[in-house]
Image (cartoon, helix red, strand yellow):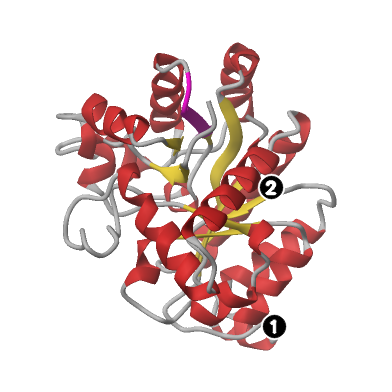
């Protein structure tokens, strides 16, 4: 079956969907919407794989360690559930062997299609936490190359922003996660993947595109024009659609829990911005996803 839409980054494996997870997935699949559920640490990575294996078609998994979970971080009940604060208090040291075993056990079925979400998140950071993030990121790049899998990147700047390549500002604590991510990726030629929830400027977008990374956009584009120029200037064969469920639901569902079924609103908006038909954009995104994630 060829899907009509694809949500290349969702978290239906999160606790936010415990009550109606199968219903949410069924609603998406019945509408012709496929999804990739993304892990953020070992538990959510395992649950993403379990979900993918439960469905014969249309549900896939990406496994990895989110940068904010490499150190003590805030607790998100949508992700980990109420009362489950043990993880957020200790953080996770990326154990390549544990993730490798998960890949070796499950990769044969073709349901694990990438590594991540991994990268650098400087929104709340210290020099020590940045060091841990970089170490985990590099290990996940190595694992992706070992298994010939793409990366699902998560990158977020600090509250203070600098424009690469002005490295002097970084020494003053004005951290730029995009600049550092690009620097690390350039040290690993041949690695490929997608830049999830892209929120950089046009210059940064072009830098990732030059490395062969696609850019994915969320429901945020349905209620702000901040990314219109980037979408207009990104080739259609380098664009992806995502929800980042359960977060940032698009208009007309804003304020509700997000879900993969709503990704069609993102596709509609991309088509509007690029002055193309929805069908043309939807088909291109499916082609892009199959090329990058090889499912």
Left/right placement of residue 156 relative to residue 263 reads: right
Residue 88 position (above or below residue 232): above
Q: Quadrant of residue 172?
A: bottom right
Task: Give coordinates of residue 223: x percent, y percent.
Answer: 31, 74
Q: Is residue 41 above or below residue 122?
A: above
- Residue 277 horizontal/vertical position (percent): 51, 63
Q: Earlier in the sequence, mark 1 or mark 2?
A: 2
In this picture, which residue range is highlighted in magenta? Answer: 57-62
Crowd tier of the residue under label 1, counting other residues whose Cα lies within 10 Å: few below 14, some 14–19, many 20 or above: some
Q: Position of residue 224 (x, y in %)?
A: 35, 78
- According to the picture, the residue beneath numbered tag 2 turns out to be 138
Where is residue 212? Give x, y as percent. Answer: 76, 57
Residue where numbered disc 1 is placed: 167
Look at the image and tell me whether residue 116 can be seen.
yes
- The answer to whether any part of residue 122 appears in the image is no
**Residue 159 occupies which quadrant of the picture?**
bottom left
Q: Quadrant of residue 15?
A: top left
């Amino acid at each position: 079956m060829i899907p009509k839409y694809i949500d290349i980054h969702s978290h239906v494996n999160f606790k936010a969907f415990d009550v109606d997870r199968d219903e949410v997935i069924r609603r998406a699949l019945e509408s012709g919407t496929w999804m990739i559920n993304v892990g953020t640490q070992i538990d959510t990575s395992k649950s993403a794989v379990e979900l993918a294996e439960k469905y014969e078609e249309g549900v896939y998994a990406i496994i990895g360690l989110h940068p904010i979970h490499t150190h003590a971080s805030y607790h998100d009940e949508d992700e980990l559930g109420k009362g489950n604060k043990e993880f957020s208090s200790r953080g996770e040291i990326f154990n390549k062997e544990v993730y490798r075993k998960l890949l070796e056990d499950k990769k044969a079925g073709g349901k694990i299609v990438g590594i991540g979400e991994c990268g650098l998140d400087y929104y709340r950071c210290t020099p020590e936490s940045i060091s841990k993030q970089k170490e985990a990121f590099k290990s996940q790049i190595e694992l992706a190359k070992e298994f010939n899998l793409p990366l699902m990147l998560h990158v977020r700047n600090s509250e203070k922003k600098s424009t690469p390549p002005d490295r002097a500002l970084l020494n003053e604590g004005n951290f730029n996660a995009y600049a550092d991510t690009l620097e690390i990726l350039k040290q690993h030629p041949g690695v490929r993947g997608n830049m999830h929830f892209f929120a950089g400027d046009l210059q940064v977008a072009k830098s990732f595109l030059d490395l062969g990374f696609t850019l994915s956009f969320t429901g945020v584009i349905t209620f702000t024009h901040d990314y219109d120029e980037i979408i207009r200037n990104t080739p259609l064969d380098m664009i992806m659609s995502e929800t980042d469920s359960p977060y940032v639901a698009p208009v007309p569902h804003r304020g509700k829990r997000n879900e993969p079924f709503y990704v069609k609103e993102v596709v509609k908006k991309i088509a509007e911005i690029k002055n193309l038909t929805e069908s043309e954009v939807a088909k291109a995104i499916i082609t892009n996803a199959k090329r990058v994630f090889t499912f």
